[in-house]
Image (cartoon, rainbow, N blue to C red):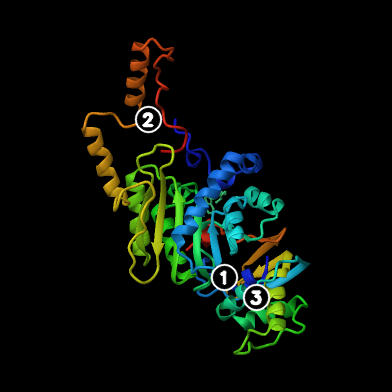
Amino acid sequence: MKLITHNMLTSKCLKGVLQGYPLAINATDVKITEVDFNPEFVSRIIPKLDWNVLWGAADSLGHSEGLPKTVEPKYEDQEFLKKAHHVLLEVEIEEGTLTCPESGRQFPISKGIPNMLLTEAEVQ
Amino acid sequence: MSKRPEHQAPPEIFYNEDEARKYTQNTRIIDIQAQMTERCLELLLLPEDTSCLLLDIGCGSGLSGAVLEESGHMWIGMDIAPAMLEVALEREAEGDLVLSDMGEGVPFRAGSFDGAVSVSAIQWLFNADKKSHKPVKRIYNFFSTLYAALSRSARAVFQFYPENESQLELLTSQAMKAGFYGGVVVDYPNSAKAKKFFLVLMTGGAAPLPQALGTEESDSLQVKYAKREASKNARGKPLKNSRAWIIEKKERRRKQGKETKPDTKFTGRKRAGRF
Ligand SMILES: C[S@@+](CC[C@H](N)C(=O)[O-])C[C@H]1O[C@@H](n2cnc3c(N)ncnc32)[C@H](O)[C@@H]1O
């Protein structure tokens, strides 16, 4: 699972959960996949991100070095976009769990795929 | 008995390892899924020359996603069948994958996506595979959470295989109830083979429904199409490729002394699972 996905993913489909965001990360295996750098895509996506959550996620995986804690208003800087690209698209959680901040429900990540399936009793 | 996949088993069972592999190795299927995804993209009306973040609902083994990649978009796919996602991993899909059931809701926060596509998947929502499954409720839950996950002005386009008109109405009415507007575009409505259904949903700003392919002017709505087919029938000449049409044609061939297969109960039968 890429951090761009983590930035969007919630556990709000759980009955009784309102935001379900952000999901806490517990990673046991992280891999880096090379992805073509597309500065235009990265700069378009930045306003849609919860930057605090991205920074926190990157930091918890040991990949926050050089990543500013807040976004500059002028984020066309190539170095910055490259760093954001790396964190959003190249750092991937292979194995681990995500935890719902409201209910504590855990969602396993296996082979890079988070399992968000609910039980019948958990569905809204 | 019907051979529609949805009637055989729940999706996560039907799309097992064998089916996932078969599905992804068949070049005919690959071509068809690619074509339909291209049409979905066209109907999405994304801003030109812009890479977008798209949601692929029922992404399966990534056949639809491959087309999104080629068009320069990043995608996140959700699917209920682990075996299909497994094949997507093997194929090194560039999109990111999430194992989830669309009927339980779209698990993403507000405004995440610039658009959503879904190729050959939402007809599965008409199933009630568990005791607790109420299709109408699952469909509404799906559309309302999808609506929230899309950015304003985004669209969602679904190619799917409805079984009958009431399914079209149910889907459209639940989508409207969830805040969308739009409707069904039927491409090539007069061709048994090329006919394709696309549910086009819009989130903001009134816009006319796009023009269907293979039709004249404003024939694009299902309702109009149904009337048209009926009136054609009424004119006496059987609809092309229908059973009556085939039997008539065979009769002509026999009269001409040409070798012709006998008429059986299989004559003119629709191919499995599609109408
Ligand atoms: C015919 S395949 C199409 C896959 C892909 N879109 C393509 O074009 O190749 C339909 C997919 O829908 C998925 N599906 C069916 N019901 C679903 C549900 N409730 N939630 C998520 N995915 C579902 C199936 O697992 C299957 O992978």
Q: Amino acid at mark 3?
A: Pro
Q: Are marks 1 and 3 on the same chain?
A: yes
Subunit of mark 3? Answer: A
Task: Pinpoint residue B47: horizontal percent, then vertical percent.
Answer: 49, 69
Task: Pinpoint residue B81: horizontal percent, then vertical percent.
Answer: 60, 50
Q: Amino acid at mark 2?
A: Asn
Quarter of the image where the C terminus of chain B is located: top left
Q: Amino acid at mark 1?
A: Thr
B205 and B137: which one is in front? B205
Determine the CA span between mark 2 and mark 1: 48 Å
> Marks 1 and 2: in contact by CB < 8 Å?
no
Which residue: 70% across, 61% down? A112
> Marks 3 and 2: in contact by CB < 8 Å?
no
Q: Return the residue at label 3.
A: A39
Q: Return the residue at label 2.
A: B241
Question: Is A92 situated above or below B82?
Answer: below
Q: Tag 1, which secondary structure?
A: loop
Q: Quadrant of residue A93?
A: bottom right
Q: Nearer the viewer, mark 1 or mark 3?
A: 3
In the image, B57: left or right of B170? right
Is residue B105 visible in the rendered image? The answer is: no
Which residue: 36% across, 72% down? B205
Q: Are marks 2 and 1 on the same chain?
A: no
Task: Pinpoint residue A95: horizontal percent, then vertical percent.
Answer: 74, 63
Q: Return the residue at label 1.
A: A10
Is residue B246 visible in the rendered image? The answer is: yes
Subunit of mark 2? Answer: B
> Marks 3 and 1: in contact by CB < 8 Å?
no
Which residue: 61% across, 59% down? B69
Q: Tag 3, which secondary structure?
A: helix
Question: Is A78 situated above or below B192?
Answer: below
